[in-house]
Amino acid sequence: MSDCIFCKIVAGDLPSKKVYEDDQILAFHDIQPASPIHVLIIPKKHIASLAEAGSEDWALIGQMQNAAAQIARELGVTESGYRVITNIGANAGQIVHHLHYHLMAGARLSPLGVHN
């Protein structure tokens, strides 16, 4: 998608501070981190959100999970703990409509909950 910021990062048209890359997945530091460690993990294939994923995408989504675990090990946060989350839709706070996981760590994170 030509107007998708993450597709532009995948294409190399926009810079990123990469932490992981393979033939199907790219991970990089968030430019507006919400925790001391905040990495975005994206498929190189454009999928708008988890809700838009088709059955043909589940293997790729599994690879994203595996990449998250590998990145956590490489960043040394496996034992202290980390969070992996994806936002789906406006009420969940999805801003970029390209499937992505937030891997957050480096501090005690607040519990997730509903906020008014």
Image (tube, rainbow, N blue to C red):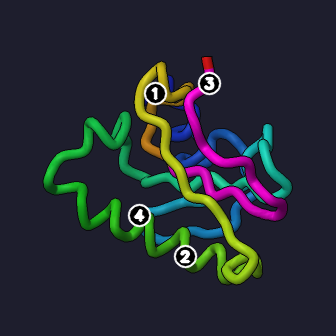
Give the labeled residue for mark 2. 69
> Callout 2: few (<14), some (14-19), or many (20+) C-alpha neighbours within 10 Å?
some
Q: Which residue is pictured at 51% across the width and 72% down the height?
A: 67
| Range covered by the magenta-colored residues | 101-115
- What is the three-letter code of the residue carrying label 4? Gln
Mark 4 → mark 2, Cα distance in angstroms? 16 Å
The numbered mark at residue 100 is none
Mark 1 → mark 2, Cα distance in angstroms? 30 Å
Horizontal and vertical percent for residue 3? 50, 23
Give the labeled residue for mark 1. 2
Which secondary structure class fits the magenta region best?
A: loop
Give the labeled residue for mark 3. 115
Horizontal and vertical percent for residue 108? 80, 59
Asked whether disc 3 touches disc 2, contact meaning CB atoms under 8 Å apart, the reply is no
| Residue 73 vertical position relative to residue 26 in the rendered view, above or below | below
Taking depth in this image into account, of 26 and 91 the one nearest to the observer is 91
Whether residue 100 is in magenta: the answer is no
Q: In which quarter of the image is the N terminus?
A: top left
Give the side of residue 55 with respect to residue 72, left or right. Answer: left
Mark 3 → mark 2, Cα distance in angstroms? 29 Å
Horizontal and vertical percent for residue 83? 62, 59
The numbered mark at residue 24 is 4
Of labels 1 and 4, earlier in sequence is 1
- What is the three-letter code of the residue carrying label 1? Ser
Whether residue 112 is in magenta: the answer is yes
> Callout 3: few (<14), some (14-19), or many (20+) C-alpha neighbours within 10 Å?
few
Mark 1 → mark 4, Cα distance in angstroms? 18 Å
Asked whether disc 3 touches disc 1, contact meaning CB atoms under 8 Å apart, the reply is no
Q: Extreme left residue here?
A: 55
